[in-house]
Amino acid sequence: MPWGLDMCVCIVSEALEAAHEFTVPAPSAGARLDLAFVASLEGVSRSRAQAWIRAGRVSLDGEVCLRPGQQVKAGQAVLLRAPEPSEEPAEPELSPLEVLHEDEDVLVVCKPAGLLTHANRDGDRSVSGSLLESHGPLPEGDVPLRAGIVHRLDRDTSGVLVVARTEDALKSLQAAFRDRVVKKVYEGLVKGAPRFDSDWVDAPLGRSQRHPDRQSVLSAEEGREALTYWEVMERFDGYAHLRLEPKTGRTHQLRVHLASIDLAIVSDPVYRSKGGRPAHLPPSAPAMERHALHAASLSFPHPRSGAEVSFSAPLPGDMQAALTWLRAERGRS
């Protein structure tokens, strides 16, 4: 092979990720295979790990594994095979963006899991970018990358999101969120047995000193006020379906608050209960490819009329499938 072509193949292989090998550490015992990648290889996203696994590039103790949800054990050897030069890494398909309501002032959408709320510097698909393409210009405010965005949902959180279409609507909705007159209701699946049927979590939040990209519970002097109300919708053996109302809007609030009371969100790869073990469903359950959190409804004063309007979105298929399995296999209690 000519030297120049050989160099090109090497460059292409490096661009499509090289081979990696690691041993499952003890803290990841019982976790999903894709989440073991996230925990063990810095900078690897869960969607990228899932693409590798489904493409047949990953082996577990020498056996090719095609299931991102495969449960791993401490000490197992995980090998990511380098791709052939012609291989293209597949990206997971996202559900289409559903518009629940639109008028001249606002757009209300149901964001699918896996979709960013606003644009990033990597050019990943986002709610903001999709609406710019389908509905035209949106007000930029002070942050051009966040055109029309008033509030955000985490990438892997699904559910109701309102987007402003005019500068006046943007300012009005920003004021409504700032003044806490917006009512947000979420549903989540958690691992653990709630001690009560309902309760409040009143715990200040702020940036973690150990992990600057995460949030953590801090002292009142160090953190910002954060308040969450939760109540049990259904109980199962070892799991629960919760209704959640955040009264403040801190980053990752629900995920951090629930983990702090040993009720971590199912399949959350970042925030875990105090024991540190991942909050996964049993291997026989339907796969949850993201954390099980859904923004079920949103109520706010309409920026033009001032009248309260409410919008809701049913649980997506993955959470419905998990609930159906829990009801059948773990029994309501």
Image: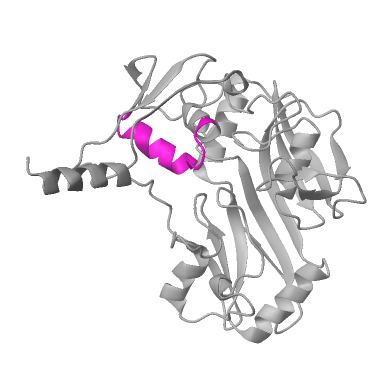
Left or right of 154, for residue 237:
right
Name the residue: 86% across, 49% down. Answer: 204
Name the residue: 65% across, 52% down. Answer: 296
Which residue occupies the extreme front position in the image?
Answer: 3
Q: Nearer the viewer, residue 148 or 146?
A: 146
Residue 191 in sight: yes
Whether residue 248 appears in magenta in the rendering, the answer is no
Q: Nearer the viewer, residue 256 or 120?
A: 120
Residue 308 in sight: no
Whether residue 44 appears in magenta in the rendering, the answer is yes
**In the image, residue 151 above or below residue 306:** above
The image quadrant that residue 105 belongs to is: bottom right
Name the residue: 33% across, 36% down. Answer: 18
Quadrant containing the C terminus is top right
**In the image, residue 27 above or below residue 179:** above
Estimate the x, y position of residue 33 in percent, counting from the top left: 47, 27
Q: Nearer the viewer, residue 269 or 237?
A: 269
Estimate the x, y position of residue 220 in percent, counting from the top left: 92, 49
Estimate the x, y position of residue 36 in percent, counting from the top left: 51, 28
Left or right of 139, for residue 238:
right
The image quadrant that residue 292 belongs to is: top right
How has the structure been colored for display?
one colour
Estimate the x, y position of residue 179 in percent, counting from the top left: 83, 70
Left or right of 314, for residue 37:
left
Quadrant containing the N terminus is top left
**In the image, residue 207 above or below residue 28:** below
Name the residue: 64% across, 78% down. Answer: 142
Tally the marks: 0
| Magenta stretch in the rendered image | 40-57
Left or right of 43, for residue 326:
right
Which residue occupies the extreme right position in the image?
Answer: 221
